[in-house]
Amino acid sequence: MLSSFVPDASRPPEDRPPGRVAAGYRCTLNDYLAHLADERRCSPATVRAYRVDIEQFLDHLATCHDSPPLESVAREHVRDWLGAVLRGGYERRTVGRKLSAVRGFFRFLAADDRIAGNPAVALRAPRVGRRLPGFLSQFQVAQSLDLAVTDERTARDRAMLETLYGSGLRAAELVGLDVGDVDFANDTLKVLGKGGKERILPLGRHEAEAIREYLARREQRDAGPLFLNSRGGRLTTRSVQNIVRRLLSRVAGASATNPHALRHAFATHLLERGADLKAVQELLGHSTLSTTQVYTHVSLERLRRTYDRAHPRSGSEN
């Protein structure tokens, strides 16, 4: 029995209601979620995603194993749940994320001396192929930025695109910007990234001009959120995704139409023009270099296609 494991693709984790979790588990789960929010400084969206994944596991314990005490949960319980998740139709990448969430939950309990050991520590997630990020060419980015500014809304949208591409921001970082984070005098942008890590980024000329024009067209110019909705409040990540999708869908041949496509383009274009990988890592706010290295694969693949198409002795048929 695994009815609660049927994927609901129409509703992202942050929009799903709390699952059915036995009362004996609820307090412990709440302790862990508070730990993620207060000590690990995870974003609300990350905490909600952890909640959904761990609740599915705890619901499985209650449904299939009669709610054993957490200190009695063994590797076999976790393996049984993992098999049920795999049979539930989830992608392997999602299964790996769920296992990571459950592993972290038990790691917290073990560190707090609530259980003797972590029953999920020896289990491995299914292997997944490395997925190369979708991105836009320099010409496609130029097309997306060729946006006629006629009012405050179009000025905002153009400034958003310029900032996403000019600074390589995540959508959540973009909506978190305040007017005071833009330093026109020193051409810098202060960004609060994942885990509350702050970084100072260069502010490009086109990006600065677009932000200036947007601020000049609105009433709140000196303080508050940088990007506003129609009611004068801070834009949400979901709104940014919808706006960017609408704008990028007009670009011919665009393989991706989400905000991350502009972040990917930012990194890829820097590397293609000779930027140092370590510098790109710092600009993106990646904690490890291996995360940034995926963009070198993208660039090399494009170089290979160009070489095969253009060089007379590449060995490919032209």
Image (cartoon, rainbow, N blue to C red):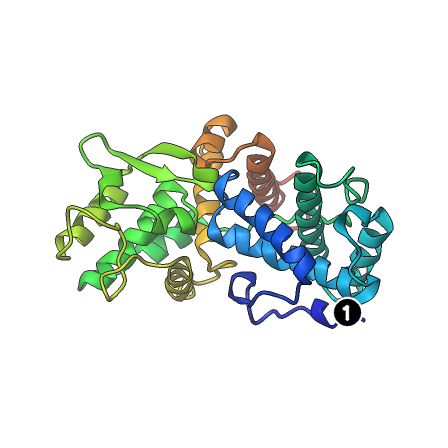
Residue 95 drawn at (x, y percent): 71, 55
Q: Position of residue 180 (x, y in %)?
A: 22, 41
Total numbered badges shown on the rendered structure: 1
Across and down, in percent, residue 269 comes to: 45, 40
From the viewer's perspective, is residue 278 above or below residue 4?
above
Above or below residue 277? Residue 305 is below
The amino acid on which the numbered mark 1 sits, given as a three-letter code, is Leu
Quadrant of the drawing holding the N terminus: bottom right
In the image, residue 86 sits, relative to residue 182, either above or below, namely below
Residue tagged by mark 1? 2
Asked whether 84 or 297 is in front, the reply is 84
Q: Secondary structure at mark 1?
A: loop
Would residue 165 be seen by someone viewing this image from the given angle? yes
Q: Residue at x 41, y 57 (%)?
A: 237
Task: Please name the residue shown 45% across and 46% down the image.
Answer: 263
List x then y, in percent, for residue 245. 42, 63
Give whichever of 263, 138 is nearer the camera: 263
Residue 91 visible (yes or no): no
Neighbor class of circle 1 (other Cα within 10 Å; few <14, some 14-19, many 20+) is some
Quadrant of residue 299 in the image? Answer: top right
Q: Give 38 or 257, whichever is nearer the viewer.
A: 38
**Quadrant hosting residue 77:** bottom right
Q: Is 176 situated left or right of 57 in this image? A: left
Residue 315 picture quarter = top right
